[in-house]
Amino acid sequence: MPWTRALVGGAAGTAAALAGLMVRYAAGVARADRSWPVQVEPGLRDLGEVDEVSILPLVERLTVDGRGLVGEPGVSYLVRAGGTRLLFDSGLSGGRARSALAHNAGVLGVDLGDLDAVVISHLHLDHVGGWRALRQRTFAFSAEPLEPRGVPAHVPTPMQHLRAEVIPTTGPRVVAPGIAVLPPLPRMLFLGPIAEQALVVNVRGFGLVLITGCGHPQIERILGVTEQVLDVPIRAVVGGLHLPVHPAGTPLIPQAVLGNPHPPWQPIGERDAAHVLDEIDARGPRLVALSGHDSTPWTYDAFGRRFGDRYRTLRVGDELRVSAAVAAGPTAGSPALG
């Protein structure tokens, strides 16, 4: 019968489309696995050091209560280190007249027109300012042009901007004394490839503070590349690690599906989180601060259990400071956290 043939034809078409996605996904995974090692140089010279780094979340899902701040499922951090003011990512709502980034910056007294650099971790809408910015391969603070004219913008993939000086990252690069971007690492998500770069700050007497946007590349690659590029121990991991484990009952279903490195019927789960925890813990971190934009309450709890008082959940307005260790011994001293 006609309706039977239509059903059979529809099922066949769906199966063919899914098979095509699986073939593309497998090929993308193979390409990513082959390509990333050639982007890494064995060392980065003249990084320098800073006495303190401050990380102020301007965009996050969670906020500090009672200050009129707004949350959204995006990321933007003001990083201040050694006299440098740098914006890491630009959130989700940059196409709006009053974006969360602009609103929260105003509440917190942050002048977005007074920046020394911008770093974009990867070209996803919740890190570049929304769908319009994503489609145009650019980034936006808000609908109104707030970006400083001529500000260097270090991006992981070819992008454009009418006001900023766009500098594609092709390898590890010092962007200011004590601050560097790492080479963009490719990762094949089920719905398409992505390249993501991380930021590192070298704090005197403490070690490296590693800042990530989503952590889409495998954690062993992010940490391993950092160790290959810089002969300095990783002592802090701050930012997103894309672990929406058990997202049912939370607003994180889109992140769990769209950012999944596995086929959609294989959700990000406890085993993925355990692997990330083990890889970070093996470095002996003194601080782990997790973004809430792609993490569930289960994830916060798992990180809190593993790292205890070394763990923080990032919130808009809750500034994080890491300063030089006071003691000179190899195991003595601890960071000053704010």
Image (spheres, rainbow, N blue to C red):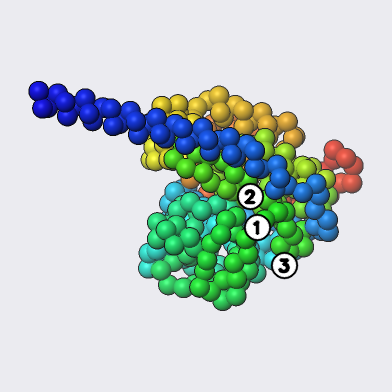
Please say if the residues under marks 1 and 2 sit with CB atoms less than 8 Å apart: yes
Amino acid marked by disc 2: Pro
Report helix, strand or loop for mark 1. Answer: loop
Snapshot quadrant of residue 20: top left
Amino acid identity at mark 1? Thr
Judge whether residue 316 can be spotted in this image.
no
Picture coordinates of residue 269, whole percent (x, y): 50, 27
Nearest the viewer among 130 and 237 is 130
> What is the C-alpha distance between the residues marked 3 and 2?
26 Å
Which residue position holds label 3? 83
Q: Secondary structure at mark 2?
A: loop
Of residues 118 and 250, the one drawn nearer to the viewer in this rendering:
118
Q: Nearer the viewer, mark 1 or mark 3?
A: 1
Residue in the picture at 43% in, 51% down: 72
Mark 3 or 2: the one toward you: 2
Q: CA distance from mark 1 to mark 2?
A: 7 Å
